Image: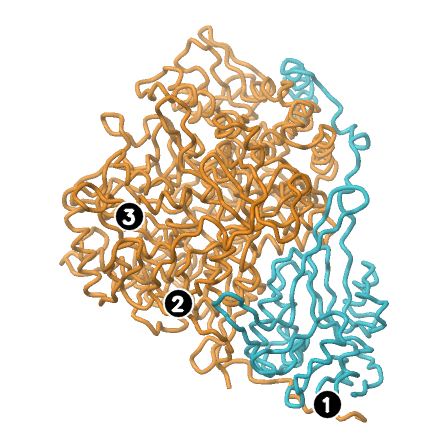
Amino acid sequence: MTQLPPPSAKKLGLVIDLDTCVGCHACVVSCKGWNTENYGAPLSDQDAYGANPSGTFLNRVHSYEVQPEQGEAQLIHFPKSCLHCEDAPCVTVCPTGASYKRAEDGIVLVNESDCIGCGLCAWACPYGARELDAKEGVMKKCTLCVDRIYNENLPEEDRQPACVRTCPSGARHFGDLGDENSDVSKLVAERGGFDLMPEQGTKPVNKYLPPRPKDEMPEFDVLAPYLEPIASDGKGFVGWLDKALSAMPGGAK
Amino acid sequence: MSLDQPQLDTSPHVSDEVRKTTCYMCACRCGINVHMKEGKVAYIEGNKDHPVNQGVLCAKGSAGIMQHNAPSRLRAPLKRVGERGSGEFEEISWEEALTMATGLLKPIREKNPEKLAFFTGRDQSQSFTGFWAQGFGTPNFAAHGGFCSVNMAAAGIYTMGGAFWEFGQPDWDHTKLFMLFGVAEDHDSNPIKMGIGKIKQRGARMIGVNPIRTGYNAVADDWVGITPGTDGLFILAMVHCLMKAGKVDLEYLARFTNASVLINEDPKSEQFGLFLRDKDGQPQVIDRNTGKLAAWNGKGVEPDLSGTHRAKGVTHRPVFHQMADRYLSDDYAPEAVAERCGIPAQRIRALAADLARVAFDEAIELDRPWTDFRGKKHEKMVGRPVSFHAMRGISAHSNGFQTCRALHILQIILGSVEVPGGMRFKPPYPKPATAHPKPHGKVTPGAALDGPHLGYTQGPEDLLLNDAGDPIRIDKAYTWENPMSAHGLMHMVISNAHAGVPYKIDTLFMYMANMSWNSSMNVGGVHKMLTDKDENGDYVIPNIIYSDAYSSEMVAYADLILPDTTYLERHDCISLLDRPICEADGVADAIRWPVVEPDRDVRGFQSVLCDLGARLDMPGFVNEDGSQKYQDYADYITNHIRRPGVGPLAGFRKGKDGPQGGRGDVNPNQIQDYIDNGGFWAEHVPENAAYYKPFSMDYQNWAVEKGFYDAVQPYIFQLYVEPLRKFQAAAEGIGERQPPEHLRERLKLTMDPLPIWYGPLEDDQIDLDEYPIHALTQRPMAMYHSWGTQNAWLRQIHGHNPLYVPTKIWEANGFEEGDWAKVSSTHGSIVVPVAHQASLNANTVWTWNAIGKRKGTWALDEGAPEATKGFLLNHLIHELLPPKGDGLRWANSDPVTGQAAWFDLRVKIEKSAVPNEAQPAMPAIKSPVAKGPSELNWKVGK
């Protein structure tokens, strides 16, 4: 069993806006690309051109239909990756110490050289956020792009996770959720950001912003004054037009 | 640290070098940073400096590395050795391939240039391929617009000098209400996502009008689950509500549209329905300053929206009067359309009222002075902050042209085009239809065509008909069947060539178009046409040359394959002469360049055309001494001059004081200058020219300076499109050039100069009780047509495609998870897996476009889900409508433009036994390339 460090002041994580995510999978593939080439073993793909293609992804987008009590069904796009929990059960369950939570910023990582691929951490994770790489036999997970966010070989503006940098709709935000004055903390406060499955007691660092209420356009009676008729046919319209035009600046002479 | 935490290098080496080029994973054409390690492509990300994507990149773009490495890449020129369709090929040398092609094409060019049909599909070099076809002399050239979205393009150009996508975009920074019609994915893929993110961040609202609530429509604040094919009716009902309430921008309509132009209303006159014009041919308005007639563009004129004019016993009324007569009619009342559209009448009213509220009560003003073309100075820019966007959803219907027009009319009466908060054009647009070329089709053996192929007809005199009244073009573009077919009709080429109507051709030459699969209707029928032989045992379509980078379904049906490179191995220019990548605030163009050299015996198609053009001795492709003019495409990009000072690229041209943007001389170092600048060139539109572009002298002068056109050309929006009336008048018997009798009634109906709505044409010819369900496809954001399936990463996102079924139909059929269904149209049947979706119009089923694959293609295993469970709706759609007993077969196309009416499809559905695989299952094709590796473990760096 592996020990968690004392809670860090700095809690790096993602804030994902479910109101804005259009489900395009840009984050999924950008993550696949960066993490295939970088941290640890590449994310492999089995039967890549065959009947049952399946590969390792650190981030996936699911879509769920929601049927409100009243009104039309809705579709919510839900990107999911490791939430870098404060009480990370994937860490405490690890028999070798390969899974660990960084003391300085709270990022949960797997030290691949110590990972024996037993899969206990994936079982322990209530979010299904870890994937065992079939080729390498080691556990892969979101690193929060720890090899980007501090990387002095990258321009400063690029020192953010690949998924955040690439997200076209701006639905993904990265920052320090331990600092209540950070942009991400403010966003969470303003928009009512929430924990995923808080009942699990994992205290996830990542937060989700809820979709705004939908299909709440005012009924017509509220808007009716905007459509107060001025005419019932073409002839009446022309009569109105003459009056309206003469009332305009530089009206008809 | 008390815990034993591993040492971690948080600053690892990222790449040896970053090469900046342009993405080609779809038509969005974003800037990309290609990270190189040890000379290989290691990682692709968005270019932060690029005007299109500003650093972001979609799933396709990031997966480009898997496209570049795809095992389906063709490896060398191929010569067919088995029967067509078998996939039996042998690799040949380029010299042999080019000798073969020259041997086929030279005699055609010398005797009957029209016997070459040269059609390019997802070509991003149309100004070049068109130039080549023009030099060859065939009238038969077009790209894929006819089966894509020509309705949108043509309706936009004729109405307001530009449409959506490459032409225009919402003013994302100022709009307060954004209404999106259709659009699962668009050419403007990343900018739309960025824009939606931006307006949501500002708290602006978004309304989605789409039978299907996914993607962009899923994040809309309000969803209107409209019945397919009724968008025009819904839009005109909102026009009705707004006009009836006087919620229209009168000042804008009077000054900047032809609402004020006078129309001859004497049914006995030859001029009936045409504009009153002065002796210079200028349309006339009544000037409110004088109460007298004046030219629309006269200095200081204030056009009157209301005054009528009587001369020589003929009454002339302004366009706006006719609009009032038409749209105030109860035919367009919400109650009259609600059931048909599937939207309650009160909801239609509420939506119209909301548009009025935001447009007029929340108007915005920018303190930017500007001057209009009548010399009037405006102190401010007044904006109506409602904006719209649409694409194939409303346009791929047989009523699509008029529907797109209706949407533009709605935008214009609200005063929301080219104003702050509304819709804005992207340079070099706007450009009115009259400033585009007319179509050209005069063939001279051994010589070039008399002008560019594609353009905008202004009346019957511009149709491409020969003296006998027969079509000049193989696709029958610019005929009475579709007089405004501005993009040609690629989807009719194979069918017409096979039928020998209007004539037989000798060689079909295609580029990047999967016409034997997802880009054709009636797939099985097309296979037969491509392989059919005549009584002598010769193929009915004698020769087929095809260029593609990949082992697509089309490869097997060609006789000679010219293998193209991947997009990271080639030169390209994203040219202002073509389909540009500008944004509303800036003009931009870009290049691709070989960030890696091909490791196979392949060549960029455009470079091959430079070679072929010289072998064929074509004007524009040979020097005076007969030698090859352009060694390759890069040479053409740098050195070709289209008009004085204007070439394929507008950036870094040679000026007196060094490189300059816009006009300038050839700069031999231009491509390197682009590379040094990150692969693109961009300049900002001056602030006082950023809105009112068609009417603003500030913009017009800047546009001439930059070389978009050679003289200022201000114009007003055409609510009433006079060229439509000219075709309609011909159908009524006016004029010399007359349509055939069987088309008169249809032309009278569909060529209406003011937008109308009529039901999808197929609805009249099938039993709607038997086929009550609408069937649609959507393009997935993470995949682009056929190209995604070979991509090892993307195919894990979309590897097969169920048919999504709404609750009502799901329950009526007793469907359960894992079920399959037989789906039938009047044309055919498919058997496919089904899935339930509640957020869907109750009478509509749909699936993802082009996921299904033919066995043996794209280097996939024959058991790949794309081939066993994936399917195409194309099998259910025919290029012709069902016979209606008049002895004629009518095209399944829009009667104005010829756009393929994909989304008119009606089906019935029933539960099926679970088959072994999706039906129809076609036999496997022998693959010209080896299968891919079973495992990928891609990492190029150590």
Task: Give the image location of residue B466, x and y in percent.
Answer: 24, 29
Instruction: Specify whether B578 is left or right of B369.
Output: left
Nearer the N terminus, badge 2 or badge 3?
A: 3
Q: The cyan chain is which one?
A: A
Alpha carbon separation for disc pair 1 and 3:
64 Å
Instruction: Specify whether B683 is left or right of B252.
Output: left
According to the image, label 3 marks what residue? B531
Question: To which chain does the residue with label 1 belong?
Answer: A
Q: Which image quarter holds the N terminus of chain A? A: bottom right
Front one among B390 and B771: B771
> Looking at the image, which residue is at 44% across and 65% down?
B861
According to the image, label 2 marks what residue? B593
Task: Give the image location of residue B786, x and y in percent.
Answer: 45, 56
Element under label 2? loop
Task: Give the image location of residue B423, x and y in percent.
Answer: 59, 43
According to the image, label 1 marks what residue? A96
Q: Which image quarter holds the C terminus of chain A? A: top right
Label 3 neighbourhood size at 10 Å, few (<14), some (14-19), many (20+)? some
